[in-house]
Image: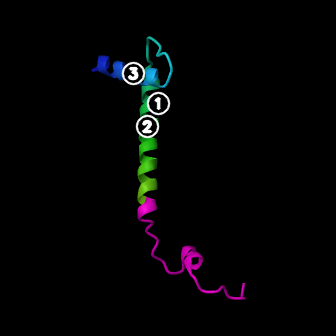
Amino acid sequence: MTDRLRYYIDLLAALCGFDSPQTVSAFGIVFVLLAAVVLIYAFYRALLLTLWPGEQDSQHIKWRVLDDEEPSDAH
């Protein structure tokens, strides 16, 4: 399993234009995996909130922004 992981790390490093070091620290692997998880989660949430914003309150600011009526003079 570690040989296959090492192969993919070397492959990704080569594709990015970097020469991979001979040893990879456990901290580096954990850090990259954690960053990947955070990135995937951020894209997931962005996609969900873009497609289904979920705000249904009629008093929310977006309804005033999207309203085509003329604004009132009262501030």
Q: How many residues crowd mark 3 within 10 Å: few (<14), some (14–19), many (20+)?
A: some
Q: Which mark is residue 36?
A: 2
Label 2's element? helix
Residue 58: x and y, percent? 50, 81
Q: Which mark is residue 11?
A: 3
User: Which comes before the other along the chain, label 2 or label 3?
Assistant: 3
User: Quadrant location of the C terminus?
Assistant: bottom right
Q: Is residue 6 magenta?
A: no
Q: Identity of the amino acid at label 2? A: Ala
Instruction: Indicate which label's residue lies in the foreground, 2 or 3.
Output: 3
- Label 1, label 2: how far apart the Cα atoms are: 9 Å
Residue highlighted by disc 1: 31
User: Residue 59 shows which numbered tag?
Assistant: none
Residue at the image position 66 percent from the left and 85 percent from the top: 71
* Any part of residue 67 in sight: yes
Mark toward the viewer: 1 or 3: 3
Q: Quadrant of residue 12?
A: top left
Residue extent of the magenta highlight: 49-75
The quarter of the image holding the N terminus is top left
At 41% across and 40% down in the image, what residue appears? Answer: 37
